[in-house]
Amino acid sequence: MITSRTVISQFCDDIRHESGNKYSLMGCYGNELLVENLPSLLPKLCVQVRAITPIDKPFTKLLIRAKMNDEIIAEINVLPNGPITPNSSVIDAPIRSELSVMIVLSPLAIAESGKLRIEAETDDEILRGGVLLFREILPSNHSS
């Protein structure tokens, strides 16, 4: 049984909406993104954010934020009309509620090495999501 809330983030180059109501994440990153030079301008960076909560503790407030270092660069109010009530006619009752948001940052200016952090503000807490580190590729010290 799911007992706590969590936020999962996947950073990628693009998110494509496919037929059959599915999404494809293109060019997924691990924990860091390397650039040739800083400062740098990325044409696009996308984030799939999933907020998960136990079914008996629904979100009444959910703000998803993208923060570059400590500056908020995007914010989405996921529940502008209040909490979502699960459908009680479901035969196999769910044990969790999951909300998904796609964030597109286009263009994204990267001034210096740092981090892009995802967080979710709920009715009573701040949930930490994923972090993507930005770093300049250092020239090799090897001589040929």
Image (tube, rainbow, N blue to C red):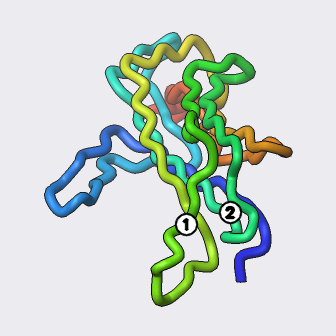
The quadrant of the image that shows the C terminus is top left
Residue in view at x 35 percent, y 26 percent: 44
Residue, disc 1: 86
Q: Is residue 43 left or right of residue 50?
A: left
Label 2 crowd (10 A; few <14 / some 14-19 / many >=20)? some
Comparing 69 with 24, the one in front is 24
Comparing 27 with 89, the one in front is 89
Q: CA distance from mark 1 to mark 2?
A: 12 Å
For marks 1 and 2 on the same chain, the one whose residue lies earlier in the sequence: 2
Q: Is residue 37 above or below residue 65?
A: above
Kindly give the residue lying farthest to the right in the view shown: 124
Which disc is residue 25 wearing?
none
Mark nearer the viewer, 1 or 2 = 1
Q: Is residue 94 left or right of residue 119?
A: left
Amino acid type at mark 1: Pro
Label 1 crowd (10 A; few <14 / some 14-19 / many >=20)? some
Q: Is residue 84 above or below residue 20?
A: above
Amino acid type at mark 2: Thr
Residue, disc 2: 53
Residue 55 placement (x, y as % from top left): 67, 70
Residue in view at x 62 percent, y 49 percent: 83
Image marks 1 and 2: residues in contact by CB distance under 8 Å: no
Q: Is residue 55 above or below residue 25?
A: below
Residue 106 placement (x, y as % from top left): 37, 21
Residue in view at x 45 percent, y 27 percent: 35
Quadrant in the picture for residue 24: bottom left
Q: Secondary structure at mark 2?
A: strand
Q: Secondary structure at mark 1?
A: loop
Q: How many marks?
A: 2
Residue 59 placement (x, y as % from top left): 69, 52
